[in-house]
């Protein structure tokens, strides 16, 4: 079994690059490659992670400028060949701006930055990211964003639902996708979505922030462990 | 702005905040009349903000050394040894005046400035904290100021990716015209890789990096050194605008540079920008600097030397490089897309020579400006001591009703609405999040952690500045001990009114004396700090507010304690002595509507013993929860532990004291701990051996908080009261038209 190789893309303004690298290393047993946004080639990797942060200061629109960084052409090419791509928070915003995922992330309904733990329902275990979770399981991940309000037109939402491409939904601790459980106004309480192949995942919550008991929870760890299991 | 040849009239001198005596000193130093650029430089260098001229005499009395102190006050921030070749670098700094005028940018640039003070010294910032004071919630401006300041702190800190892990927020009418925004940053460095600001090596290049220079913030330092009046909002153009994205790039670029061994000295451009940074570096190195202002990267055209030297544009640094390192350095700043310019070189003349368009536009001696800035021994009077209030002089009310009032009052109400707008988890090492006694961040890649707290009780400081100064330090010591951390050092942020008034100067002197006593007694040296004076509007001063920021060390973050109850059936143990001190208490103010009486005294010898005992109990793992008893007394502290856990408790007051005095008295040096009944005999015995008063006051469990013989209330109801005040206040219909 060949050990998993992963790359974390670093944009000017990325600030969760080290956090996700730490979580990946804990699951992989070795450090991922850190790839600078101006690079035009990716190393030979099994997984690409687009981390959270404020790429280009969120100027213009969150993720809009990063989506046009030189490295993103290569990320799109790899995704087209089936290499899994994980976008967390600002990474999710970048993937939508790059056209790898549908929809957009708008300003939170209450117009404020929100940093807190939320409960999420894992909608399917049929992906390299969620194979270690049971469908319907409720997990606790933190969110930390001002623009996480997922929006897509009705047809796109129907298609996402119909294709089973909703990855995570904001829910109550009991698993109910109620308005009270929705922290940012996202359509249908959507916290994360897949592309058509379920090999590209974008989500606003941060699994890497609760992947270690010392930090208060380990619900996020199963995502990284599952990726190692699926891709090694 | 007027040209450099404008005449220096009495009016010009006055508008630069210089007194006639100070101007005479300028003439003596220069040996001629200064030009406007030179006068501007004197003005900012000798402003209260930059020179500490009113407080210096008293700041010198604070203890600043300990075996673990690597660098005390005088550099950009304080440095302490935390073992394993690592150092913690930290400081707290005010941005009060700008935050009142333009709350978002004022607070944001306050965070940016304190971050730079810390990474200038070679540290990666790992945590931010803040201490905020706002006016009466009913004042028409308060809501707007809270919203702006919180958004500004979050907007900056979240973007740079440094977690904002806690702080404190108070409201009081004395801050109506002068809010306080004190920001603290803690960074981590290698102990043998600390960078200082003393220039060295004649001929070495002086390099400017970061953002371009614009016309923003000119005379910010002099604005921060004067009282406000009604027209202060006209000073808005002197508030700087922050760009946290550039700051993030600057952090990464500077840390990358610092790993290359090419930097001789480095200094951020904070208050008074290029002026204070260049003078500081040259003065500390005993050298001169010649700068070509044409080479300064500029955002606007036609800037005068005066504007270039006094601009407070943000996100800029000045460095002295080893000769020949320019290209390597330039490549790093190019990578991060930041400006890089060699703007001058060091000389042996001891003078600052500035050129613009080929001509010398200023030529000043450095030492007389930087070192011989005025130092005043301002007249001061001690405040009159307030009488001690006996419990019987304070009306008793139903304790449950009073508890409800206290938990929903602005000072005690949950500040979740604030800290949820701060990313407090980025960097992946936040072990104790906001809401506890102290925040705990792990040292990345290790089991060690730093505990961080900010503390001050301004109503005690008004009642008795000396006792209030002692209390602020003691409470910080307690908060660190309550999470199991060994208290190491403090940074102070002294916020007061106009020092030219003897009664205000008296507050400053007495508070510093009190702080000094506590720091000495607790082996808790002051390693950095900041002074903010003239916090007055139309002659009305703020409550004296000597905010203390403190850092402690945990050898193992798994071995910490937090305040929520952990399990039903645990005994609740009260440490320390309870006499029912209601003078200057929150109960007196919020329930009885009175602000009077002497504040509770701090017994420093006991304080230390108790702190050591608490840390020992946490270290042994025998206690399940710990919380210090502060504002609101025992019943509030019990309620806070219950609310954090969603679990109730039953407590019984001691006999022999009036019930309201036992419940809400604010006697100092007390903690609550919980432990399983099986551990109780060992704990009580250990307390006796340690000469620490300890008694069991109740048991955890259930859904209600019950005070035996007095009443009961559900924890859910307490949570609702405690959580709803601030969001309700912030979303109330706007009445400010």
Image: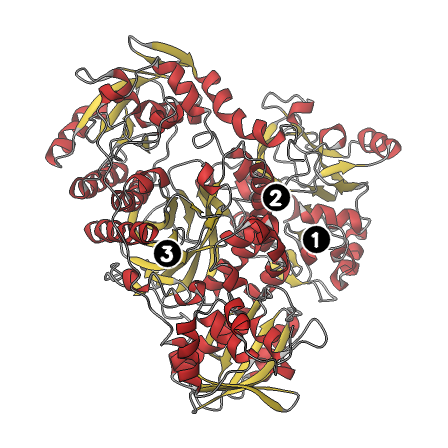
Name the quarter where the N terminus of chain B is drawn.
bottom right
Residue B198 pos. (x, y %): 40, 78
Q: Chain of mark 2?
A: A
Q: CA distance from mark 2 to mark 3?
A: 67 Å
Q: CA distance from mark 1 to mark 3?
A: 43 Å
Residue B447 pos. (x, y %): 38, 49
Identify the residue position indicated by label 1 in the image: A58
- Callouts 2 and 3 in the same chain: no
SS at badge 3: loop
Which one is earlier in the sequence, the residue at label 1 or at label 2?
A: 1
Name the quarter where the C terminus of chain B is drawn.
top right
Q: Chain of mark 1?
A: A
Q: What is the quadrant of residue B160 in the picture?
A: bottom right
- Say whether residue B196 is visible: no
Q: Is residue B362 left or right of residue B696?
A: right
Tell which of B632 and B55 is nearer to you: B55
Q: Residues within 10 Å of mark 3 (few under 14, many from 20)?
A: many
Q: CA distance from mark 1 to mark 2?
A: 34 Å
At x 57%, y 66%, the residue is B312
Identify the residue position indicated by label 2 in the image: A229
Dot 1 and dot 3 residues touching (CB under 8 Å): no
At x 86%, y 31%, the residue is A154
Depth check, mark 1 against mark 3: the one in front is 3
Identify the residue position indicated by label 3 in the image: B499
SS at badge 2: helix
Depth check, mark 2 against mark 3: the one in front is 3
Residue B149 pos. (x, y %): 56, 45
Q: Residues within 10 Å of mark 2 (few under 14, many from 20)?
A: some
Residue B416 pos. (x, y %): 52, 34
């Amino acid at each position: 079994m060949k050990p998993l190789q992963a790359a974390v893309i670093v944009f000017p303004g990325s600030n969760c690059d080290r956090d996700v690298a730490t979580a990946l290393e804990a699951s992989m047993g070795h450090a991922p490659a850190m790839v600078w946004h101006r690079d035009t080639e990716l190393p030979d990797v099994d997984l690409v992670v687009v981390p959270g942060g404020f790429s280009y200061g969120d100027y213009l629109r969150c993720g809009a400028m990063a989506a046009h960084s030189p490295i993103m052409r290569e990320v799109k090419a790899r995704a087209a060949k089936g290499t899994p791509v994980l976008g967390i928070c600002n990474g999710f915003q970048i993937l939508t701006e790059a056209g790898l995922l549908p929809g957009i992330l708008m300003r939170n309904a209450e117009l404020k930055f929100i940093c807190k733990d939320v409960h999420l329902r894992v909608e399917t275990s049929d992906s390299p990211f969620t194979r270690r979770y049971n469908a319907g399981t409720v997990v606790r991940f933190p969110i930390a964003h001002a623009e996480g309000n997922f929006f897509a037109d009705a047809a796109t939402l129907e298609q996402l639902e119909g294709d089973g491409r909703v990855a995570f939904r904001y829910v109550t601790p009991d698993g109910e996708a109620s308005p009270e459980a929705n922290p940012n106004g996202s359509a249908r309480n959507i916290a994360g979505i897949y592309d058509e192949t379920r090999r590209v995942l974008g989500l606003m919550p941060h699994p890497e922030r609760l992947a270690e008991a010392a930090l208060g929870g380990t619900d996020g760890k199963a995502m990284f462990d599952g990726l190692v299991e699926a891709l090694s | 702005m007027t040209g450099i040849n404008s005449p220096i009239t009495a009016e010009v001198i006055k508008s630069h905040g210089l007194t006639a005596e100070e101007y005479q000193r300028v003439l003596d130093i220069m040996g001629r009349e200064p030009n406007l650029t030179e006068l501007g430089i004197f003005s900012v260098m000798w402003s209260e903000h930059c020179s500490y001229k009113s407080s210096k005499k008293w700041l010198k009395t604070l203890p600043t050394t300990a075996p673990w102190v690597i660098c005390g006050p005088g550099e950009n921030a304080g440095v302490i040894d935390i073992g394993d070749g690592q150092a913690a670098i930290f400081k707290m700094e005010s941005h009060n005046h700008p935050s009142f005028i333009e709350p978002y940018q004022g607070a944001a640039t306050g965070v940016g400035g304190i971050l730079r003070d810390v990474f200038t010294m070679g540290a990666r910032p790992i945590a931010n904290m803040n201490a905020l004071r706002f006016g009466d919630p009913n004042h028409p401006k308060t809501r707007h100021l809270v919203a702006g300041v919180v958004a500004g702190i979050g907007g900056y800190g979240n973007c740079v990716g440094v977690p904002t892990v806690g702080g404190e927020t108070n409201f009081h009418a004395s801050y109506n015209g002068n809010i306080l925004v004190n920001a603290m940053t803690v960074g981590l460095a290698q102990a043998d890789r600390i960078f200082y600001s003393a220039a060295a090596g004649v001929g070495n290049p002086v390099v400017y990096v970061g953002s371009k220079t614009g016309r923003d913030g000119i005379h910010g330092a002099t604005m921060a050194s004067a009282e406000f009046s009604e027209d202060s909002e006209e000073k808005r153009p002197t508030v700087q605008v922050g760009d946290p994205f550039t700051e993030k790039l600057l952090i990464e670029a500077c840390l990358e540079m610092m790993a290359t061994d090419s930097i001789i000295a480095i200094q951020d451009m904070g208050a008074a920008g290029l002026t204070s940074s260049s003078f500081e570096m040259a003065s500390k190195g005993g050298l001169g600097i010649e700068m070509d202002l044409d080479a300064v990267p500029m955002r606007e055209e036609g800037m005068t030397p005066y504007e270039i030297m006094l601009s407070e544009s943000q996100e800029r640094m000045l460095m002295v490089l080893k000769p020949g390192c320019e290209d390597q350095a330039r490549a790093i700043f190019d990578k991060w897309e930041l400006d890089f310019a060699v703007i001058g070189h060091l000389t042996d003349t001891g003078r600052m020579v500035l050129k613009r368009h080929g001509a010398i536009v200023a030529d000043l001696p450095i030492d007389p400006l930087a070192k011989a800035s005025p130092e005043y021994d301002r007249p001061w009077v001690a405040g009159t001591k307030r009488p001690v209030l006996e419990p019987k002089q304070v009306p008793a009310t139903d304790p449950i009703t009073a508890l409800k009032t206290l938990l929903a009052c602005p000072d005690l109400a949950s500040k979740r609405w604030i800290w949820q707008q701060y990313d407090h988890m980025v960097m992946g090492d936040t072990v104790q999040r906001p809401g506890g006694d102290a925040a705990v961040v792990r040292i990345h890649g290790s089991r060690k952690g730093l505990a961080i707290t900010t503390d001050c009780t301004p109503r005690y400081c008004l009642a008795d500045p000396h006792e209030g100064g002692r209390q602020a330090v003691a409470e910080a010591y307690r908060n660190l001990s309550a999470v199991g951390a060994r208290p190491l050092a403090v940074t102070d942020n002294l916020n007061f009114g106009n020092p030219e008034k003897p009664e205000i100067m008296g507050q400053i002197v007495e508070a510093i004396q009190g702080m000094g006593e506590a720091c000495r007694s607790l082996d808790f040296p002051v390693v950095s700090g900041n002074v903010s004076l003239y916090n007055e509007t139309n002659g009305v001063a703020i409550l004296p507010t000597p905010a203390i920021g403190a850092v402690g060390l945990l050898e193992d973050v798994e071995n910490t304690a937090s305040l929520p109850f952990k399990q039903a059936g645990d005994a609740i143990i009260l440490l320390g002595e309870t006499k029912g001190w209601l003078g200057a208490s929150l109960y007196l103010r919020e329930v009885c509507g009175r602000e009077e009486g002497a504040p509770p005294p701090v017994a420093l010898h006991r304080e230390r013993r108790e702190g050591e005992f608490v840390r020992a109990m946490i270290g042994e793992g025998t206690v399940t929860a710990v919380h210090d008893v502060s504002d609101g007394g025992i019943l509030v502290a019990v309620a806070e532990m219950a609310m954090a856990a969603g679990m109730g408790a039953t407590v019984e007051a001691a006999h022999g004291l009036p019930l309201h005095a036992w419940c809400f008295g604010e006697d100092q040096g007390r903690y609550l701990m919980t432990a399983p009944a099986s551990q109780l005999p060992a704990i009580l015995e250990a307390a006796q051996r340690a000469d620490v008063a300890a008694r069991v006051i109740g048991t955890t469990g259930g859904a209600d908080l019950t005070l035996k013989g007095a009443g009961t209330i559900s924890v859910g109801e307490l949570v609702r009261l405690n959580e709803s005040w601030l969001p309700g206040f912030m979303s109330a219909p706007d009445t400010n038209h």
